[in-house]
Amino acid sequence: MQTHLDCLVCFMRQALAAARLGSVDPALHRKVIDETGRMLADLDLEKSPPENAVFLYRLIADLTGNSDPFVGLKRESNEFALSMRDQISNTIVGASDPLRAALRFAACGNIIDYAAQHSFDAAVTMAECGSQSFVLDDYPRLLEKLEHADQEKTKILYLADNCGELVFDSLLIGELQRLGCVVTLAVRGAPVINDATMDDVHACGLDTLCRVIDNGTDCPGTPLADCSDIFQQAFADADVILSKGMGNFETLSDVSAPLFFLFTVKCMRVASYLHKATGKNAKEIAGSGEMVFVAQNTLLPG
């Protein structure tokens, strides 16, 4: 996805929010806004929004002297998710289709996003998860992919998104492993917004869950050309790539690969893209937190 003019307004909002987290000085907040305005004038709109966001958050870090202003919110998100893990795990285990249930909870967890345009209540969302449905649902395609593969050797690359939801991702990874799949979990290479890094993997006790790598970037997405060689090799080798979150979707939406996108739609531009790509009724994808599980070959047929 390319950056739209609407994204520039969102960048300005994100800049002020991050500046306020990084400093209590109103004069510094004003400086961040001024410098962000100058930066936006030179953005390459051909790039995806997350690729452009890299420069925004580097700028904010330089101006505030705080390389990780979201660290407190990330810790709270991880603690919240860990407090719910056993309850949700029991629900998944008791479900008639545990893999399907795990997908649903992983999608619901994607509501924990501090760069999104809307406010959220993670506790309410997770409590209501059982009654939520996917507006785009390619679960049958995933099952078909797994059934036609040798599950003892099926390699799945799981692209993580945010803190907190990382815990719910681990429950989905567990279900995939129970099917015999070999899973590699990939996180960001450095802190950006509330995206998960290796520090969060350790904090949530997920280091022994499966092989874990980082993508080598501080982008809130997956810009393949900028990712590490290790990550690019894992991407190329994967039989299935499960991509969590809008940032990963925005950077990978035009990439031809065995991708399945799992996220909640929190942006009108993403909603519009999905509407055009799938023909889905625009009212059903309004950008207000709808859950999506869609295969790349649904979006890029042929």
Image (tube, rainbow, N blue to C red):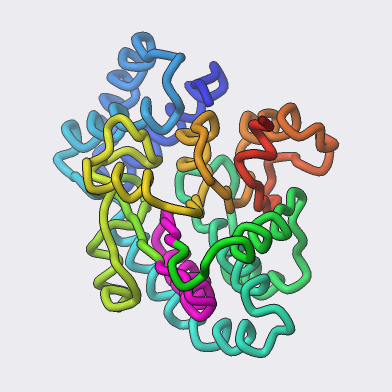
| 160 within the magenta span | yes
| 103 within the magenta span | no
Left or right position of 159 against 258:
left
- Rendered image quadrant of residue 130: bottom right
Camera sees residue 28: no
Left or right position of 159 against 38:
right
Q: 239 and 69: which one is in front? A: 239
Q: Residue at x 71, y 71 (%)?
A: 128
Q: Position of residue 171 (x, y in %)?
A: 49, 75
Q: Up-down: is 79 above or below 31?
A: below
- Rendered image quadrant of residue 228: top left
Q: Residue at x 66, y 35 (%)?
A: 299
Q: How many marks?
A: 0
Q: Residue at x 67, y 90 (%)?
A: 94
Q: Up-down: is 31 above or below 107?
A: above
Q: Residue furthest top?
A: 41
Camera sees residue 288: yes
Q: Residue at x 37, y 49 (%)?
A: 237
Give the residues drawn in magenta, as a range.
155-182
Left or right position of 59 against 245:
left
Q: Up-down: is 246 above or below 143?
A: above
- Rendered image quadrant of residue 56: top left
Q: Position of residue 122 (x, y in %)?
A: 57, 65
Q: Position of residue 217 (x, y in %)?
A: 25, 40
Q: Which image quarter is the C terminus in? A: top right
Q: 180 and 35: which one is in front? A: 180
Q: Position of residue 238 (x, y in %)?
A: 42, 52
Q: 238 and 274: which one is in front? A: 238
Q: 185 and 62: which one is in front? A: 185
